[in-house]
Image (cartoon, grey):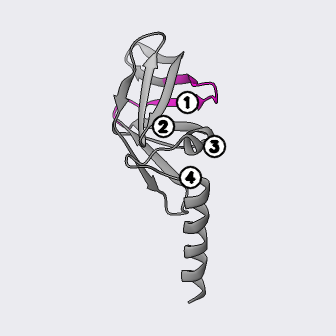
Amino acid sequence: MKPLIAILAVAAFLLVVYPAHAGGISNNLLLSSTWCSFSYNKITGYSNTTRVRFNKNGTYTTGGRAEGSSSGKYGSYASQHDSGSGGRWKVVKGELYLSEGSSQMQLVRTVVKKNSNGYPIVVADGVEYSQCK
């Protein structure tokens, strides 16, 4: 019975700290952390990491790194590429809208899930973002 009480206490805490609307996203949730995604292609050996930071003034910044290596009969090749961008963001009735640079705001399809430890995972247009450590 004690684990159930602990789970209910954590759930109640998350509802207070991360209130969600119809679409599941809230300003508090987005502002609570820098959000990271990671992908790895086991066939090519390349990985991609992206960090997104939402700011209180309605702007966001992203940074990314792609890296990997390959080898063949002519030797080995390693590569790394850094990228970054930014724009504006807003939440309307639980739905996230983003614009890159000064372009028009576009709806981002989002779902908020919880990982096995109860921390939020934001799935934005099919890409999972967790709180960066």
Q: Is residue 14 above or below residue 77?
A: below
* Separation (CA) of disc 3 from disc 4: 9 Å
Residue annotated with mark 4: 18
Amino acid beneath label 1: Val
Residue occupying image coordinates x 42% and y 22%:
71
Q: Earlier in the sequence, mark 3 or mark 2?
A: 3
Q: Earlier in the sequence, mark 3 or mark 4?
A: 4
Q: Is residue 44 magenta?
A: yes
Residue 14: image location, x then y, percent: 57, 60
Q: Which residue is outermost to the bottom?
A: 1
Q: Is residue 65 above or below residue 116?
A: above
* Separation (CA) of disc 2 from disc 1: 12 Å
Assess whether mark 4 and mark 2 are in contact (beta carbons under 8 angstroms).
no
Assess whether mark 4 and mark 3 are in contact (beta carbons under 8 angstroms).
yes
| Mark 2: few/some/many CA within 10 Å (<14, 14-19, 20+) | some
Q: Which residue is more in the foreground, 73 or 25?
A: 25
Amino acid beneath label 3: Ser
* Separation (CA) of disc 2 from disc 4: 23 Å
Residue occupying image coordinates x 48% and y 51%:
20
Residue annotated with mark 1: 52
Amino acid beneath label 4: Tyr
Q: Which mark is residue 32?
A: 3
